[in-house]
Amino acid sequence: MSLKFVQTFILACCVFLWGCANRSSPAPVSNLSSGQTSSQQKININQGSYKVKPSETLYSIAFRANLDFRELAKINGISSPYTIYPGQLLQLSPAKQKNKKASKYPKKTGKSTVLQQKNNKNSKKGLDPKKQREYGQKQATKKQSSETVKGSNNIQWRWPVAGKITRTFSNKDNGYKGLYITNKAKTPVHAAASGTVVYAGDALRGYGHLIIVKHNDDYLSAYAHNAAILVKEKQEIKVGQKIAEMGNTESATTGLRFEIRFRGKSVNPAKYLPKH
């Protein structure tokens, strides 16, 4: 074995080891398809603001923050067509207004006022905070349900993809906020209803290659973990049109995460899609 060959071999090994030692691996990405860490998909609203990253849209940011895009636009004084820019700082909640400190005693001290104070005091004692919250939640759910049904009457919904449903919608805080439908890689993904593509990209952590479609001012649908995106932003699409191919981007298995949002809030897609 020649000395030149030995020197070349040693040099090659040194280069290889140096490359391994200096290679940086990407940060791990949480898999949201399991539904166990769904809170990670939300922007931390406690921070109060969010800096726009490249390729994001107002719709995608509102989607992550569980906000109505119109609400987010109003907070930041952004008008249609809701153009935003990388580096732009968006406020995620309205500025808090300082309430004037209420007077401890009412101006009137007549018998009626004293009696009213006594009644209010007694009524507060009898209130159960837990029952109050439950009642309020039930009333809000009933109101939203009636509004969603009314607003969805003009939308023709269809199943976005053929396959097996392996995860269903849950109303729990950390529950799965859509349907997970599995099938083979590159299975065609279709638009569940006609509308306009308002986001197409992979900037939303945990969703992989994602498409968001606006159907009207109240409804959006989302298609996540795609292998390929076949549409672009601002493109008008028809119900049933092929918009993507099923994949497993940022998912442990091959499948489609499908969501429907009503005024920024997740709703159960099974209530809108035709019965099998």
Image (cartoon, grey):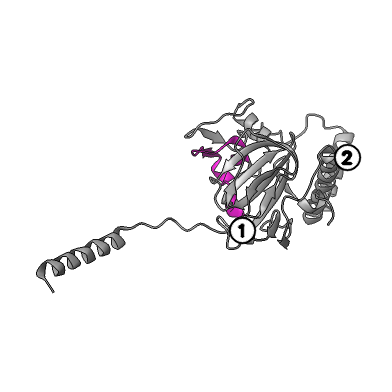
Q: Residue at x 56, y 51 (%)?
A: 208
Asked if the stretch drawn in magenta spans residue 39, the answer is: yes
Q: Residue at x 56, y 40 (%)?
A: 48
Res 163 → quadrant: bottom right
Can the viewer see residue 162 in this picture? yes
Quadrant position of the C terminus in the picture: bottom right
- Percent across and percent down for residue 206 are 57, 53
Element carrying mark 2: helix
Asked if the stretch drawn in magenta spans residue 273, the answer is: no
Residues at marks 2 and 1 touching, judged by CB atoms closer than 8 Å: no
Quadrant position of the N terminus in the picture: bottom left
Type of the residue with mark 1: Ala
Task: Write down the residue under mark 1.
Answer: 185
Asked if residue 118 lies left or right of residue 99, the reply is: right
- Percent across and percent down for residue 156 are 81, 41
- Percent across and percent down for residue 63 are 64, 43
Q: In the rendered structure, which segment of residues is drawn in magenta? A: 35-62
- Percent across and percent down for residue 82 are 61, 29
Q: Which residue is nearer to you in this view: 269 or 48?
A: 269
Disc 1 crowd rating (10 Å Cα; few below 14, some 14-19, many 20+) is some
Residue 63, compared with residue 33, is above or below; it is above
Can the viewer see residue 65 in this picture? no
Q: Residue furthest left?
A: 3
Task: Write down the residue under mark 2.
Answer: 115
Q: Which residue is nearer to you in this view: 194 or 5?
A: 5
Q: CA distance from mark 2 to mark 1?
A: 72 Å
